[in-house]
Amino acid sequence: MPRPRRSFSLGWVILLALVDGVLIGFLTVGAALALFTDTFDNTGNAFTIDTLDPPSGLTASVVGTNIRLDWTPTTDTYATGYNVLRSPTQGSGYSPLDTVMPYTAVTYTDNTAAAGIRYYYVLQTYFQSWLSVYCNEANAAVPTNTGWRSPNAEAAVPNPNNGDGNGFELNPTNAFADGGSYAEDVDSGTASSQDCASTGRDRHRFYNYGFTIPDGQTINGIEVRLDAWVYLITTGNPKMCVDLSWDGGTTWTATKTTANLTTSQQTYTLGSVSDPWGHTWSSTQFSDANFRLRITDIASSTTRNFRLDWVAVQVTYTPP
């Protein structure tokens, strides 16, 4: 019986490969290989290398109770925007605060900054998941204050050259707190004068305010609050003059004066959050040993009764 016959056919396979821009082809015929090559232009797929640049010229400034950042935008017009980062430590420890878009943005306001803390800011440009290096660091601090502080000690300025020499002779400690009682200077002075420097007018000192201002702070301003009035008659334009001492009463600032007092209690605020009363203060000058407040009662009459419910002081300062 004859054996069956087997037939074979040749298989054709073409293999292509791109090596260094050269197209290489392999033609397989059965078990044999044929080699051919060709080239093509790949310039349309060339890669561009770029560095994502941060913004420049970052500055920080205090606006009210907020901190405003300003900068010059990145030069990379394809960028999406900026990450804003903040730290209470110079040069490190930055945490994400917010993002700002578009890349043309030039300002941001931080309304979460706590008063009395100096913050350090940097920005970085972003595009998709690509981040630039940090820009220059800028810093600012919202000022804080002591709150209204009351005195715990007082003393009339005696004669010579201080009117009657007894100041607020009736209940002077009543001026230590905001309340219904008051201190009183009866028939004030020995000379009718509206000059705060007059030797014929009564004076009184208040001190031991218990300030605890950390070392190194910048003192921005001092406010003095007087809750005051005169009894029954306003003839003679009665006023109160205030000056401050930083060395226990040896040296005094320039004097500030209230408006004319009325016959009902009013609050008079002298100075401001940005007024240091003509003196560059240090934190230690607000110690109980150094800080003094002096009131002089003036009027073109010696028969005015001056009343004082509260003499308070508030200091505004900025951390270094």
Image: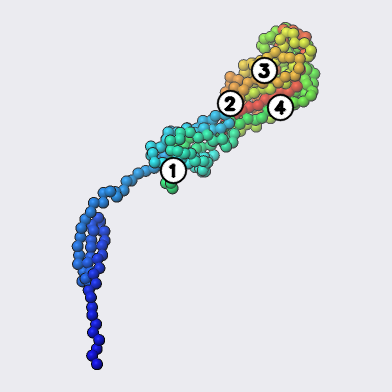
Q: In the rendered image, which residue does mark 3 sit on? A: 242
Judge the density around disc 2: few (<14), some (14-19), many (≥20) Cα neighbours within 10 Å: many
Judge the density around disc 3: few (<14), some (14-19), many (≥20) Cα neighbours within 10 Å: many
| Residue 268 on image: x %, y % | 69, 19
Q: In the rendered image, which residue does mark 2 sit on? A: 220
| Residue 310 on image: x %, y % | 73, 23
The residue depicted at 78 percent of the width and 21 percent of the height is: 182
Eye-nearest disc, 3 or 1: 1
Mark 4: which amino acid?
Ser
**Which label's residue is closer to the chain start, 2 or 3?**
2
The residue depicted at 71 percent of the width and 27 percent of the height is: 150
Position of the C terminus by quadrant: top right
**Res. 238 in view:** yes
Q: What is the secondary structure assignment of the residue under circle 4?
A: loop
Instruction: Tell me if label 4 and label 3 are in contact, CB under 8 Å.
Output: no
Q: Which mark is residue 126?
A: 1
**Which label's residue is closer to the chain start, 3 or 1?**
1
Mark 1: which amino acid?
Tyr
The residue depicted at 75 percent of the width and 10 percent of the height is: 234
| Residue 85 on image: x %, y % | 50, 41
Q: Is residue 4 above or below residue 305?
A: below
**Which label's residue is closer to the chain start, 2 or 1?**
1
Q: In the rendered image, which residue does mark 4 sit on? A: 150
| Structural distance between the alpha carbons of marks 3 and 1 | 56 Å
Mark 2: which amino acid?
Asn
